[in-house]
Structure formats: C-alpha cells, structure tokens
Image: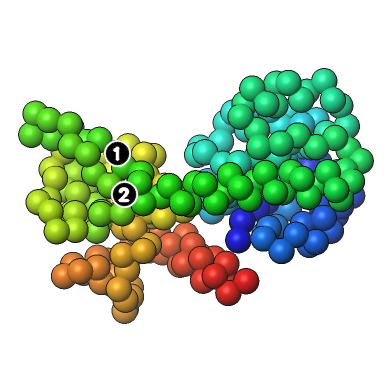
Amino acid sequence: MIKAIALDDEPLALEILQSLCGEIDYIDLQKTFTKSDEAFKYLKKYPVDLLFLDVNMPSISGLDFYKKLPHKIMVIFTTAYSEYAVEGFTLSATDYLLKPISFSRFQQAAEKAYLQFKTQNQNLEQQYLFIRADYSLIKILFSDILYIEGLDDYLKIHIQNQKTVVARMTLKAILQKLPETEFVRVHRSFIIPISKIEKIRNKIIHIAQAEIPVSTSFETAFFDLLNKKDNSKMK
C-alpha cells in the first residue's frame, strides 16, 4: 500500500484527488493540506511514500516546496499550466498531471508510482551503506542492523551475527542515510529498525538480547509509525 498525502491551495482540487485515489486500491491518501507549512510539518514527522503536489500556490511554488523536503519521496505534480512540466521532470518527478485530471490519466500516473514503489521495496534487502571505522570503509547491509547506539560523537552499530562497528558519527547524520520508513529514532541515544522488534513492553523495545527504552520525546512519532504500518498491512 502506497501511503500518500496531497497539497493544493484549492479545496475542490483536493476533493477531486481524494475521489480519484479512492478508485485506486493500492494508494492510501492519508491526509490533504491547503497550507504548505502544515504539510511540511507533517512530512517531517510522518514520512510517506507519495506526494500529490500542486505547482501554483500563493505562499510557495510546488517546485520550491519539493526542493525543501527533508527526505526522498515520490512526487506527482498537479497544475493547470503545462509549461512547468519540464522543470518538474528535472526534479525526478514520478509524473505530472495537467488539470482537469481524467481518471485514465490519473490511473497511468498511479501505475508509475506503484512500479517505482515496488522496485524500491524489492531492493531494500540489497541496500547498504559504507561506514568509516578502524581506518577502513565497512559495508553494512540495512537488513543486518539490529540497532544503533549513540555515544556523544560516536556510534555503535550493532549488527546481526557480526562484530559491532564503532564509528565517529552522530545519530542525526546516520539517520539521514537510512530508509526513513524502516528505521526510526526512539531515544536520544537509539535508532532501531522496525523489522527487528521482537516485542514492546512498558515502553521497552526488545531486539535480540537488548532492551531499548522509548523516550517521551520520541514516543508519539514512534507509535504512530507502528500503527500506520499495521494499518497498511491490513488493507
């Protein structure tokens, strides 16, 4: 299921998008926004897979809004002006829909997004990052990471069936290199992969032999992400 939101300063345009998404069983349009600042705050807290984005808005253009996004996301631009299409595609847009949007054209754009989404998920097990440690560059598969522990300016990356890697890096820096829908910060000192959680009890996450606390400042975002993942699996 593709998690999506839409941003357009015209409420009627958002109603049309809601109706179109309702006809596509693999797109979950979770929220719509008429104000760019509210949409931006939401995206910082709740990463999604796809953004339907109007180009012509009074406070900021959709193109500039997309350039400001804190993480990579698929985007389908919508506008009544075809001259923006070229710039939209230079930003690696998934597609560009010209208003008024027909269902057949919307379906075509949705299928592009679905193929892109499937490719990204199929490649997840093959994704990795290189970490500089012990005077070497060490390749670490995302799928092997149990959890990441922050110690001031250092990290301890706990890896399944491998030696723990210690690197000079901050949690904030490494979080930007990880898939945002799979890894989440749960404490000022811990990042965990959702897939490795064995159980959660009394705000303590159990992964392998470790017990990782969920702090108050990260609690809401963490449990919201878990709920969204559960809901998407049920659809």
Helix, strand or loop for disc 2: helix
Residue visible at 82% across and 55% down in the picture: 20
Q: Name the secondary structure under disc 1.
A: strand
Looking at the picture, which amino acid does disc 2 mark? Phe
The residue lying at 61 percent from left, 29 percent from top is 92
The answer to whether residue 193 shows anywhere in this view is yes
Image quadrant containing the C terminus? bottom right
Q: Answer above or below: position of 209 versus 175.
A: below
Name the residue nearer the viewer: 40 or 147: 147
The x and y percentages for residue 216 are 37, 63
- Mark 1–mark 2 Cα distance, whole angstroms, equals 7 Å
- Is residue 170 placed above or below 60 in the rendered structure? below
Quadrant housing residue 186: bottom left
**Residue under numbered circle 1:** 129
At x 54%, y 65%, the residue is: 228
Could you tell whether 231 is left or right of 23 in the image?
left
Left/right placement of residue 18 relative to residue 129 reads right
Color encoding of the figure: rainbow
* Mark 2 Cα shell of 10 Å, populated few (<14), some (14-19), many (≥20): many
Give the quadrant of residue 176. top left
Q: Position of residue 185 (x, y in %)?
A: 36, 54
Which mark is drawn over residue 142? 2
Numbered label tally? 2
Quarter of the figure with the N terminus: bottom right
> Foreground: 215 or 222?
222
Q: Are the residues at dot 1 and dot 2 in contact (C-beta closer than 8 Å)?
A: yes
Where residue 54 appears, x then y in whole percent? 77, 37
Q: Work out whether residue 175 can be spotted.
A: no
Q: Nearer the viewer, residue 186 or 94?
A: 94
